[in-house]
Image (spheres, grey):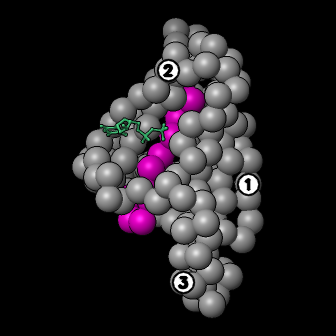
Amino acid sequence: MNSQTIPQARLVNLDIIGGDMGSLVVLEKASPVPFDIFRTYYIWNVPKHAPRGQHAHYEGQQFFICLRGSCRFSCDNGYARHDFIMDQPDKGLYIPAMVWGEQEYLSDDTLVLVLADAPYDDNDYIRDYKTFMDLTTRKIN
Ligand code: TYD
């Protein structure tokens, strides 16, 4: 595997339909989300600055939208870390498998919508950072 194929998170612009009477974004099957949506959940009431996430998935892909408030997403593929400040409902963050994600909620009213490509499976989680680093290094070298 060369460096160009190391998975990393990326922002996706979401098309807005609407105008003076309001805005609407459509998420449908695999558009513009880059996978078929299987599961949806949302998170709110997280204490400001408390860490969430702190895991990677072996296979699961996820797509995050900050519907209200703001949230810092730190995404680490074992070689590089990128921070994304999410504070617009017309921006999505795609996090592929084998990317370590941590979230810091930056305001009390933050509401985050998450779309996933598979059923919940605790066995798909990598919750130990050292294990994650060992796996990503082994995969690439
Ligand atoms: P988790 O994915 O660890 O949340 P975060 O990454 O935001 O900290 O999930 C928190 C808890 O919710 C954990 O006990 C598992 C449970 N959970 C489900 O039962 N089903 C789901 O689809 C998700 C996402 C979580």
Circle nearer the N terminus (2, 1): 2
Residue type of the residue flagged with mark 3: Lys
* Residue placed under numbered mark 2 in the picture: 44
Tell me residue 22's x, y (percent). 52, 13
N-terminal of the pair, mark 3 or mark 2, is 2
Q: Residue at x 40, y 34 (%)?
A: 26
Look at 57% across and 30% down and name the residue there.
Answer: 66
Q: Where does residue 114 sit, x and y in percent of width and height?
A: 43, 38
Q: Residues within 10 Å of mark 1 (few under 14, many from 20)?
A: few
Instruction: Establish if 30 lies above or below 91.
Output: below
Q: Using the image, tell me which numbered label, if any, was put on residue 82.
A: 1
Q: Secondary structure at mark 1?
A: strand
Question: Which residue is located at x 73 percent, y 59 percent?
Answer: 81
Q: Where does the magenta region start and end?
A: 56-67
- How many residues crowd around disc 3 within 10 Å: few (fewer than 14), some, or many (20 or more)? few
Q: Residues within 10 Å of mark 2 (few under 14, many from 20)?
A: some
Q: Nearer the viewer, residue 95 or 133?
A: 133
Write down the residue under mark 3.
139
Q: SS class of the residue under badge 2?
A: strand
Q: Amino acid at mark 2?
A: Trp
Mark 3: which secondary structure?
helix
Image quadrant of ligand 1 equals top left
Tag 2 and tag 1, C-beta contact below 8 Å: no
**Type of secondary structure dominating the magenta stretch:** strand
Amino acid at circle 1: His
Q: Is residue 48 left or right of residue 31?
A: right
**Marks 3/1: CA distance?**
20 Å
